[in-house]
Image (cartoon, rainbow, N blue to C red):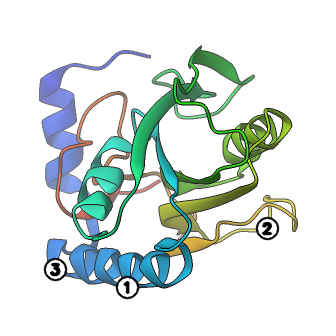
Amino acid sequence: MSITAELARQIYTEADLLYTPAQVNEALDRMAALITTDLSERDPIIICVMTGGLIPAGHLLTRLDFPLHIDYLHATRYRGATRGGELRWITRPLLPFVDRTVLVIDDILDEGLTLAAIQDELRAQGAAAVYSAVLVQKQHDRRPEQITADYVGLEVVDRYVFGCGMDYHGYHRNLPGIYAVHGL
């Protein structure tokens, strides 16, 4: 479903603010401190999951003060929709990650099927260890128990959220706070 910029503006003005930019930054600081403690001596490859992971990865990377490599991938189940479908690989990572520690950064852990498929693929291709970081994790019982993120910035209620990399029909990824669509 495609929407107009005018409708996107309306959704934003009516949305419920869940986390302010300051709260998001505090969460990113906490995540970066934990990642630094765990991975700073492991020469990791940080992989950004496009497009949603772009904003959280950018903010996290500037907080990681140790040697690392950066790559990206693009795999999606949403393609601009509000519900996920089958996983589709658009771009795979380019760096060789055999026997390397990899940290995958994404915007949100909802049901986790996309993140789990990405991690499984990286392990199958020879990564020594695969970790995951998400800015937001939804609170619900639809996610299988075994699907978790190693680093989680914030928890959100089970609503349609946007901002900080998460979109509403392609809009609002750029917002510095996290919002929920009013009434959803």
Q: Nearer the viewer, residue 136 or 66?
A: 66
Residue marked by disc 2: 141
Q: Which residue is mark 3?
A: 22
- Point out the tag, 3 or 2, that comes first from the N-terminus: 3
Q: Quadrant of the N terminus?
A: top left
**Residue plotted at (24% across, 44% down):** 11
Q: Are marks 3 and 1 in contact (CB under 8 Å)?
A: no
Which amino acid, mark 2? Asp
Q: Amino acid at mark 1?
A: Arg
Look at mark 1 in the image and give the residue it sits on. Answer: 30
**166 relative position to 130: left or right:** left
How far from the left and from the top, in percent, is residue 163? 28, 52
Residue 151 appears in the picture as rendered: yes
* Residue at x 51% of width, y 21% of height: 79
Amino acid identity at mark 3:
Ala
Q: Position of residue 60 (x, y in %)?
A: 31, 63
Front-lying residue, 133 or 129: 129
